Amino acid sequence: MIDLYTAATPNGHKVSIALEELDLPYRMQVLDLGAREQKAAWYLAINPNGRIPAIVDRDEGDFAVFESGAILIYLAEKTGRLLPADVKGRSRVLQWLMFQMGGIGPMMGQANVFHRYLPERIQTAIDRYQGETRRLFRVLDGHLADHEFLAGEFSIADIANWAWVRTHRWSGVEVDDLPQLKRWIDAIRARPAVQRGIERPPSAIGERSDSDERARRFAEEARRMVETGQSRQEGV
């Protein structure tokens, strides 16, 4: 049994999607980021960085893993799925996983802060992070023109990137002129395990717009955290 410590964020959904795709039994505990539960002593013993997600593999002597990308690799290696065993195939998956970890996630995260959460608009910063997000999306679109998935078969690289890219409207970035990226977004969204994963816990932002009540509550909570000097990124 795996214990998953998470919240309704793209990084959290990476892991719940993977657990559903791999059909691994797990228990979920949703942390209250607004209440800083991720900074509690008991959780820091699991994840010293004090962020979500983290897992504890009870079948492996209560082995704890933190950082969403590391968790995806651990789960893939544990099951022998979603990550090729050959050196080149594995490298291709890890390259696109690192693309998300080092690019898509940080740039979209900062776009969210400046576009959604700060009480004042700093247009230079908004343009910077939305522009870099768009550039990364164009990289994905170009690659997907010749590939059904990012690294051959469906893999943890697709899970990691999709969990963020699907929230593009929340970052203020559209993908209507990126047909291959749209095709890939829709194809992964149609997978039953992915649909289950983004409801564990239910997504507040996803493909929804500002008019959705759950999205409005999510944004209000994030703004309060920013106004008190606690960026939403602290728990994500």
Image (spheres, rainbow, N blue to C red):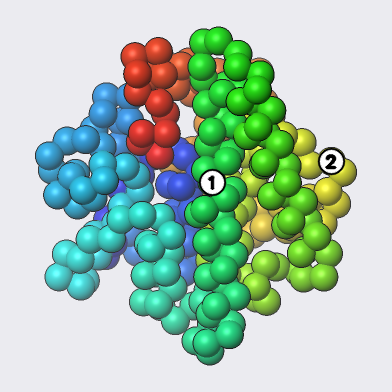
Q: Position of residue 194 (x, y in %)?
A: 57, 55
- Say what secondary structure mark 1 lies in: helix
**Compared to 174, does 153 lie above or below?**
below
Which residue is painted at 73% across and 42% down in the image?
134
Please indicate whether residue 56 sits to the left or right of residue 124 in the image: left
**Which of the marked residues, 2 or 1, is nearer the chain's N terminus?**
1
**Identity of the amino acid at label 2?**
Asp
The foreground one among 57 and 86 is 86
Q: Quadrant of the C terminus?
A: top left
Q: Position of residue 6 (x, y in %)?
A: 35, 44
CA gap, disc 2 and disc 1: 20 Å
Q: Position of residue 224 (x, y in %)?
A: 40, 14
Most distant residue in the front direction: 124
The foreground one among 11 and 214 is 11
| Residue highlighted by disc 2 | 176
Q: What number of labels is visible?
A: 2
Most distant residue in the top direction: 120
Which residue is painted at 33% across and 30% down in the image?
33
- Which marked residue is nearer to the observer: mark 2 or mark 1? 1
**Compared to 104, does 8 lie above or below?**
above
Please indicate whether residue 84 sits to the left or right of residue 225 in the image: right
The foreground one among 39 and 24 is 39
Residue 105 is marked as 1
**Compared to 1, does 84 lie above or below?**
below
Which residue is painted at 35% across and 48% down in the image?
53
